[in-house]
Image (cartoon, rainbow, N blue to C red):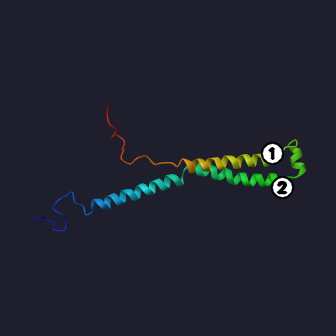
Amino acid sequence: MPEHPERPAHPEHHGYSDKDVQRQVSELQTKSATAARLFDIRRIIGGLFVLYGVIVTIAGITASDADIDKAEGVNINLWTGLGMLALGLFFLAWLKLRPVAPPPPDVVAGDEPKD
């Protein structure tokens, strides 16, 4: 008879089934992938360029003749804003077309096969 009746006789049984462990692992992998997508630098750069591009484009659309004359006849705010919008949209499209994939969880440092 075991000394502690509340503990199982076999140490490999900890009260968790394989299904519970697999479910927890898959939940953690999903959270990791979500965090990787959320903090992808392309999202931050693209979002900021789009935001500032809209602001600068509006400043270019509402520019006075005096502002345009300062830039030797070029509406620099309009062209810069449109360029920033294009760059920001490029980053966001790149994020959408090639999403980041977290590294496979099966490979642990030191477990690589040896040649």
Q: Is residue 100 left or right of residue 83?
A: left
- Residue 4: percent from left, percent from top: 16, 66
Dot 2 falls on a residue whose secondary structure is: loop
Q: For the residue marked with disc 2, what is the amino acid?
A: Thr
Q: In this view, does 46 lie to the left or right of 59?
A: left
- Residue 21: percent from left, percent from top: 32, 59
N-terminal of the pair, mark 1 or mark 2, is 2
**Residue under numbered circle 1:** 76
Q: Which residue is drawn at 80% across and 53% down?
A: 59
How far apart marks 1 and 2 lie (CA) works out to: 12 Å
Quadrant of the image containing the C terminus: top left
Q: For the residue marked with disc 1, what is the amino acid?
A: Ile
Q: Residue at x 36, y 59 (%)?
A: 24
Instruction: Out of 10 and 95, give the one closest to the viewer.
Output: 95
Q: Which residue is drawn at 52% across and 53% down?
A: 37
Quadrant of the image containing the N terminus: bottom left
Dot 2: within a 10 Å radius of its alpha carbon, few (fewer than 14), some, or many (20 or more) residues?
Answer: few
Q: Which residue lies furthest to the bottom in this view?
A: 6
Q: Residue furthest front?
A: 97
- Residue 46: percent from left, percent from top: 63, 50
**Residue under numbered circle 2:** 62
